[in-house]
């Protein structure tokens, strides 16, 4: 059962549990929806503030669909129960936080990504040894990566890159670690190739190291194609007669490596897209068609 299905099962179990409502009578809770805080237990009561996603509050009572809560700043009031997830004495809290975060992450909004990341971090913290921890930690880091690229054009060393590295250490050898390592790999690639052998040759080594460590990664086929493509690009580079690095011998060597990698990928039961691209690469190599300009389909920095 994958993580999303497991989360949905936990959500259904929680909703059908007779004590689910009673658990909301007291204890810590997390806000999962931006909503109003009312002075009294009536929706027509005066709003005295707003709650934001990710805030932690203390539940002190319940009346119908409204919960009485207090905030760390001593402010207290009433708010809609369906916008909070109770943490204390709730064995499904991590799953509920994960489900809420997953829904928010589907939006293309920067605010939604940041809110979802906060909830994913909380889910990971609640379920350090549970089935959601690794995936939640990765999803939080991935959303931070996306948000930083949208805001500044690049991920931050002290932000998402540090978070991704932490996932690879804390949850080593998990699918989440492999996905986190793949984003770190992408960040280590050259931003632009300058037509020399330097970048593609170095990237073959980086991508090969990734595959050695994570051979069963969901990104394995893409990484294998990226290696084949770089060998094919090196063929074109080393055949540039007007360059100091002109070397027909190295071109022959890389053509053989590109064909071997492509043929193996085309035979393996992997994603159809990478099999098709591998066959196109074989055709290009056999017909001396240059591939250097096709870098957009062969693993980029961002």
Image (cartoon, rainbow, N blue to C red):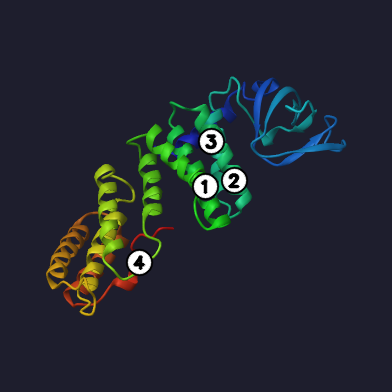
Quarter where residue 236 is shown:
bottom left
Circle 2 Cα neighbour tier, 10 Å, few/some/many (<14 / 14–19 / ≥20): many
Q: Secondary structure at mark 4?
A: loop
Query: Which of the two labelled residues, at mark 4 and mark 1, occupies the earlier sequence position?
Result: 1
> Which one is in front in this view, the residue at disc 4 or the one at disc 2?
4
| 226 on left or right of 24 | left
- As measured in the structure, the alpha-carbon distance from the residue carrying label 4 to the one carrying label 2 is 33 Å
| Residue for badge 4 | 193
Quarter where residue 213 is shown:
top left
Q: Which mark is residue 143?
A: 1
Q: Position of residue 201 (x, y in %)?
A: 25, 60
Q: Position of residue 71 (x, y in %)?
A: 74, 28
| 4 on left or right of 16 | left
Report the front residue among 146 and 32. 146
Q: Secondary structure at mark 2?
A: helix
Picture mark count? 4
> Which one is in front in this view, the residue at disc 3 or the one at disc 4?
4
| Residue for badge 3 | 121
Query: Which residue is pictured at 70% across the width and 39% down the height?
Result: 52
- As measured in the structure, the alpha-carbon distance from the residue carrying label 3 to the one carrying label 2 is 11 Å
Query: Which residue is pictured at 23% across the width and 80% down the height?
Result: 242
């Amino acid at each position: 059962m994958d993580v999303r299905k497991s989360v949905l099962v936990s959500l259904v179990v929680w909703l059908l549990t007779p004590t689910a409502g009673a658990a909301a009578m007291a204890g810590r809770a997390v806000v999962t929806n931006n909503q109003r805080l009312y002075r009294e237990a009536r929706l027509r009561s005066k709003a005295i503030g707003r709650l934001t996603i990710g805030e932690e509050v203390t539940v002190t009572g319940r009346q119908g669909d409204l919960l009485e809560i207090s905030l760390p700043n001593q402010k207290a009031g009433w708010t809609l129960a369906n916008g909070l997830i109770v943490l204390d004495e709730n064995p499904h809290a991590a799953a509920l936080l994960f489900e809420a975060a997953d829904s928010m992450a589907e939006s293309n909004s920067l605010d939604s990504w940041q809110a979802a990341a906060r909830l994913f971090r909380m889910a990971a913290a609640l379920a350090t040894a549970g089935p959601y921890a690794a995936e939640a930690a990765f999803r939080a880091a991935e959303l931070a990566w996306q948000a930083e690229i949208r805001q500044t054009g690049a991920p931050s060393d002290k932000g998402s890159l540090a978070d991704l590295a932490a996932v690879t250490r804390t949850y080593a050898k998990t699918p989440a670690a492999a996905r986190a390592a793949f984003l770190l790999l992408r960040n280590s690639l050259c931003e632009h190739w300058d037509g020399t052998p330097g970048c593609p040759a170095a990237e073959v080594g980086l991508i090969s190291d990734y595959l050695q460590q994570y051979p069963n990664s969901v990104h394995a086929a893409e990484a294998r194609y990226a290696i084949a493509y770089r060998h094919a690009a090196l063929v074109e580079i080393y055949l540039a007669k007007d360059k100091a690095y002109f070397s027909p011998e190295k071109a022959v060597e890389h053509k053989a490596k590109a064909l071997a990698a492509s043929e193996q990928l085309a035979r393996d039961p992997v994603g159809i897209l990478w099999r098709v691209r591998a066959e196109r690469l074989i055709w290009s190599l056999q017909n001396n068609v240059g591939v250097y300009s096709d870098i957009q389909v062969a693993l980029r920095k961002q």
